[in-house]
Amino acid sequence: MVLFDGGGAFGCTKTDNYPGPDAAFQGNIIDSVTGKNMLTETGGLQIELRQISWTANPSPYDIPSKPDGTFEDTRIFSGHYNIIPTKGPFWPLADSTIMDIKGNTTHDFKVMPYLEIVNTTHVQSADSLVMTFQLQAPRTVGLPQLSDARLFVNNTPYVGSGANIQSFYNQSAASVAINSDWNATIAATTYRMVVHNLQAGWTYYARVGVRVNDSYKKYNLSEAVQVVMPPGK
């Protein structure tokens, strides 16, 4: 970059010689309960980086999660970083990771979700989709109050709180208000949610999300399922 001073067209110039981003950083966000990649969505959580080799008080830089529980940024400045997963539906990590990023760097992070969605079923009936599920809490002491559960439906595999069909989202039977601390009744309940008016011949994708009332209010999510509607008569 060439920088001009205020002396007019023939003033002196200064050249910005700082190197551009020259590294890549990617990895997996692993559910510590299942040992598999966390079920999430685009931006469902963030990997926060602070380049401590640049300044003693760096501004945070976030890499959003991908739906498959991975993250990647191919334009990172090489350097020494303080890194932590944050802004997601999991127990806050006590410690960050201090590491160098240079070249093509890979690192995985483990997090403990607030909630696990288990025993899911889905049944297509006429123009409706019914999903049932149960909840498990890997850790109950100090767990924020459960807020609500919701059924998300979209016409692409990218489905979740930020990618859904609004007409289904707004149906009253597609959500359940919980508004309670964790208890034995929640643990024993099989929740049921329904969406109506699915179009004949369409293919949909659906998943359940449940959230707690923490600072970020992000959803723990189930696997997405495909729902193929039969053609109309």
Image: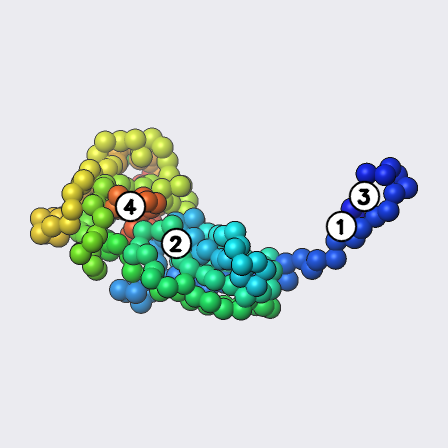
Q: Amino acid at mark 3?
A: Phe
- How packed mark 2 is, by other alpha carbons closer than 10 Å (few <14, some 14-19, many 20 or more), is some
Q: Amino acid at mark 1?
A: Met
Q: Amino acid at mark 2?
A: Thr
**Which residue position holds label 2?**
86
| x and y percentages locating residue 132 in the rendered image | 19, 47
Q: 118 or 56: which is nearer to us?
A: 56
Q: Distance of mark 4 from mark 1, alpha carbons?
A: 44 Å
Q: Which mark is residue 214?
A: 4
Q: Distance of mark 3 from mark 4, alpha carbons?
A: 49 Å
**Which residue position holds label 3?**
4
Q: 196 or 84: which is nearer to us?
A: 84
Q: Determine whether the residue tagged by mark 2 lies in a helix, strand or loop.
A: strand
Image quarter hosting the C terminus: top left
- How packed mark 3 is, by other alpha carbons closer than 10 Å (few <14, some 14-19, many 20 or more), is some
Q: Relative to residue 170, is residue 202 depicted above or below?
A: below
Residue pictured at 83% horizontal, 48% vertical:
13
Q: Determine whether the residue tagged by mark 1 lies in a helix, strand or loop.
A: loop
**Which residue position holds label 1?**
1
Taking the image as drawn, is residue 206 in sight? no
Q: Distance of mark 3 from mark 2, alpha carbons?
A: 41 Å
Of the residues tagged 3 and 1, which is closer to the observer?
Answer: 3
Residue located farthest toward the right when viewing the structure as drawn: 10
